[in-house]
Amino acid sequence: MLLCFRVKNMDVRTGLIALFCLIGLTWAQPVKYIDCGSTSGKVIGVDINPCPNQPCQLHKGNSYTVNVTFTSNVNSDKSTAVVHGIVGGIPIPFSIPVPDGCRSGIQCPIKTGQTYNYQASLPVKTEYPSIKCVVEWELRDNGNEDLFCIKFPVQIVN
């Protein structure tokens, strides 16, 4: 009887672990991106949470988490994010709550050869138009060079 109880508990735990893993896989997916000029670093991966399909549908009034893993090729005391939505070839600034990369998951100073996981919030304002566009996200070092520069398509929806 005791053995049967242990097996059932183990089956329940195993099932719960598998369920949580599957939920995690559907919640944040790696995003297809284009490197648009990362001169001071190398991008390893990008994901947006939540973004189960691509292009990511960004709902007005919601906020999304952008995660970029990169390796730095330089030393830098600071990092600053600059974000634009590109519509018809024209870059339109997207404001983000915390443009300071050193307050966005990166422990500064940034060191050559180290890998970092940048995490930022992207709020989608209700006044944004419903439109397809390309987001260009840069993280700049002390010398205003790009630790990373990525572009990825999104669709802003109601």
Image (cartoon, grey):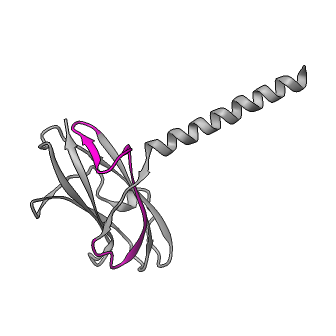
Using the image as rendered, state which of residue 24 and residue 93 is in the foreground: 24
The range drawn in magenta is 36-62
Res. 37 image quadrant? bottom left
From the image, which quarter does the C terminus lie in?
top left
Looking at the picture, does residue 119 appear above or below residue 149?
above
Residue drawn at (66%, 33%), measured in percent from left and top?
15
Residue 102 to residue 6: above or below: below
Location of residue 65 with respect to 17 vertically, above or below: below
Which one is nearer the viewer's eye here, 48 or 109?
48
Looking at the image, how many numbered discs can be counted on the residues? 0
Quadrant of the rendering where the N terminus is positioned? top right
Q: Is residue 126 left or right of residue 77?
A: left
Q: Position of residue 124 (x, y in %)?
A: 23, 43
Q: Is residue 61 magenta?
A: yes
Q: Which residue sits at x=78%, y=26%? A: 8
Name the residue at 17% across, 50% down: 132
User: Picture quarter containing residue 83?
Assistant: bottom left
The location of residue 104, given as percent across then percent down, is: 39, 56
Residue 148 pos. (x, y %)? 34, 70
Say if the magenta span includes residue 53: yes
Q: Residue at x 54, y 40 (%)?
A: 22
In the rendered view, does 16 fall on the left or right side of 51?
right
